[in-house]
Amino acid sequence: MSMRLNLAKIEAALLESVRADPALIGTILVNDGQSHAGFSRETDMFAADYRILTAIAEGRAEAEHATTKWRRCYPWLATATGENGENDIEGYEFGYGPAFVLDPVQVTAVAEGLAGERWGSGAGFEVLVAFYAAAAREGKAVVGGVN
């Protein structure tokens, strides 16, 4: 069974709408034909195989820290993928757990943190790092989840 990490860059105004109505997360992350102000499916989406992502993170944690507990070793990657639980949307499940949101300030911190954890330098996460760097440059928030 496939597990996909889905992320979307959204404008701050849409973030407020998402917080008021968490069901919008599903319409943003799943192609339902609806469009939302401040969001373009072509330029603002990121998707990756979540099982491959976690396998790479576990392998790197084991090689660098002698543990497979990657969420503890790489807290910025855990935040970027919604694995730390701190930014979950309570009461809204998206496939394999809660959806999460990061405001523009958090997105900037994540972009810098991923670079600091060296995920953008041949670690297999260059596209994820580029996604967060672009969101930070654009002043956007991020919503995400695994389905």
Image (tube, rainbow, N blue to C red):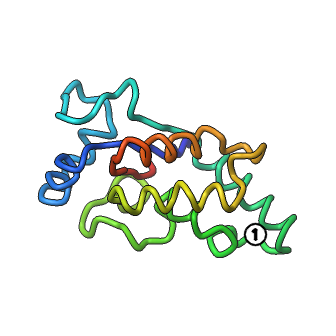
- Residue pictured at 41% horizontal, 35% vertical: 45
Q: Is residue 35 above or below residue 115?
A: above
- Residue pictured at 30% horizontal, 43% vertical: 10
Tell me the residue that label 1 is attached to.
68
Name the spot of residue 48 as percent of width and height, x first: 56, 40
**Which residue occupies the foreground of this view, 27 or 3?**
27
Crowd band around label 1 with a 10 angstrom C-alpha radius: few (<14), some (14–19), many (20+): some
- Residue pictured at 26% horizontal, 69% vertical: 90
Q: Amino acid at mark 1?
A: Thr
Q: Is residue 6 above or below residue 93?
A: above
139 on left or right of 64: left
Residue at far front of view: 137
Query: Total of numbered circles in the picture?
Result: 1
Name the spot of residue 85 as percent of width and height, x first: 43, 71
Name the spot of residue 97 as percent of width and height, x first: 40, 61
Q: Is residue 70 above or below residue 34?
A: below
Name the spot of residue 53 as percent of width and height, x first: 65, 49
67 on left or right of 93: right
Check disc 1 and report its element: helix, strand or loop: loop
- Residue pictured at 19% horizontal, 46% vertical: 14
Quadrant location of residue 77?
A: bottom right
Q: Quadrant of the N terminus?
A: top right
121 on left or right of 12: right
Quadrant location of residue 40?
A: top left
